[in-house]
Amino acid sequence: FLIVCTSAGVTYSKNPAVTTCCKTATFLLIFLPVAFRYDVGVDYFSYVDIYQAITHKGSTFIEIGYWWLNYIVFLLGGNAQFVLAISAFITLFFFYKGVEKEKWLIYSVLFFMLIFIWYCSTVRQMISMALAFYAWREYEKGKRSLALVTVAIACLFHLSSVLYPLIYFFCKKINMNKKKALFLFFVAIALSFGAKGLLTNVLSNILADTTYGSYTTSHWFESTETESGLGMIIRYISYLAIILFFPTDKVLNGRFILALFVLYAMIDIISIQV
């Protein structure tokens, strides 16, 4: 509630000083709980172990950008918690950097609906994602060199960033509309329930010989326990509402944004059952 209020203050305030205060308050309200969390996020202790492996064992199994971040923090007398705090800062800074004040409120709402849970868990991926978002905005402004350099930096934190330019141009080429979006949305739901065994086997074979191979035999790769299913239903309803009510033809690059969102929603929906 507080974050919605401060974000609305950014979007609707006409006073520059109030806008700056609301931006700062929004940033801190999101950043501080994540920066100083303990045992929150499925990979929390994995990143503590990564810090220990880099600083005490000299391991070099991680992307070079994240390796240097850990090592510099170690040289400055910090610990794994400082690395997580700096990572949280970098992610949030580049997620919001360059966002027009008129869009601040919608960005904050979508951040909590779609990204916050990952913000607490997938540290390297979130840094690369935020850098990719920033690169996209700069590319749209015509700053292509800066965008390409930013994507290259993102790759230093997670190699999956090499896919972001491909995703960008793929979504640009799709003439997405609400009918196509709804069709793909329901296809994703059908696949998530009707073909989850097949999808799991396919992913197991793909990941087996990669650094993520260990996941295929861990408890993270077991069938999902839906319990009441309330969380899944809320997620489905949220995605459906965005597809139905997003002003596709009234927003600059609306069809591209809708295509990008549908791709994200499909991957997330299918992954729930894998």
Image (cartoon, rainbow, N blue to C red):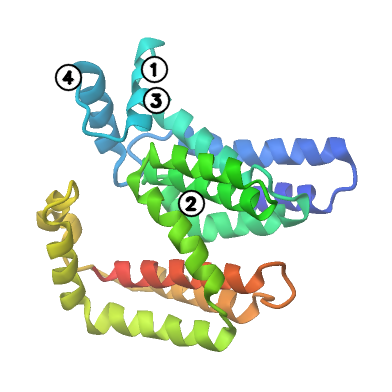
Position of residue 264 relative to residue 119, above or below, is: below
Marks 1 and 4: CB-CB under 8 Å?
Answer: no
User: Which comes sooner in the sequence, label 2 or label 1?
Assistant: 1
- For the question of whether residue 136 can be seen, the reply is yes
Choose the circle earlier in sequence order: 4 or 2: 4
**Image quarter in which the C terminus is found:** bottom left
Whole-percent x, y for residue 132 in the image: 51, 49
Element assignment for label 2 = helix
Residue linked to disc 2: 116
Would you name the residue on which mark 3 appears? 69
Which SS class for mark 3?
helix
Instruction: Identify the residue at horizontal 61%, vertical 47% (top origin).
Output: 144
Residue drawn 55% across the image and 41% down it: 92
Whether tag 2 and tag 1 are in contact, CB under 8 A, the answer is no
Q: Residue 72 has which mark?
A: 1
Left or right of 268 on screen, residue 112: right
Q: Amino acid at mark 1?
A: Ile
